[in-house]
Amino acid sequence: MLVLTPFEVQSSQTDLGWLSQGIPGLIETGLRRTPGISIMGHGRWAEEIASRGWEPESVDTDSAVRLAKDLGARRLLRGNYIQLGEEIRIKATLVDTASGVEILQSSQPAT
């Protein structure tokens, strides 16, 4: 199973807040079309965080990896985004929950 977490905004621009759920939502929609991939979407992830009394923004990578592993996930996808002028830059990191090692990291512009 792959866990998709909300992406974090790396700027003070509050008008970009909707992307926190929008980016993983788009990724989830695309991945659900792929046979053989089991996904825990960002909505279910938010429920798991809330059930533990945690604040979403206080969950660091190590805690997220441990929780994803406890929930039976093999991979965790985390990310962030920032607006630089007219461009929004998105960074995503795929982590193996068994080892905690980053398997893949990508940074892409989204205009």
Image (cartoon, rainbow, N blue to C red):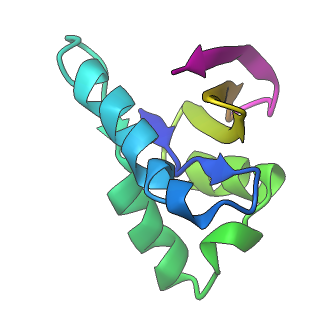
Q: Which residue is located at x 32 percent, y 32 percent?
A: 26
Q: Does residue 71 appear in the picture of this structure?
A: no
Relative placement, left or right, of 50 versus 36 is right
Image position, residue 83 (x, y; %): 68, 39
On screen, 85 above or below 64? above
The quadrant in which the N terminus is found is: top left
On screen, 66 above or below 81? below
On screen, 106 above or below 92? above
Image position, residue 6 (x, y; %): 52, 52
Q: Which residue is located at x 25 percent, y 14 percent?
A: 36
Q: Which residue is located at x 69 percent, y 28 percent?
A: 95
Q: Nearer the viewer, residue 109 or 52?
A: 109
Q: Nearer the viewer, residue 86 or 75?
A: 86
Relative placement, left or right, of 50 versus 101 is left
Relative placement, left or right, of 49 versus 104 is left
Image position, residue 65 (x, y; %): 70, 47
Q: Does residue 47 appear in the picture of this structure?
A: yes
Give the farthest residue toward the bottom: 53
Q: Which stretch did the figure color magenta?
A: 98-111
Residue 77: name its quadrant: top right
Q: Which residue is located at x 40 percent, y 72 percent?
A: 47
| Number of residue marks | 0
Q: Can residue 73 be found in the magenta stretch?
A: no
On screen, 43 above or below 82? below
Q: Can residue 106 be found in the magenta stretch?
A: yes
Main SS of residues in magenta = strand
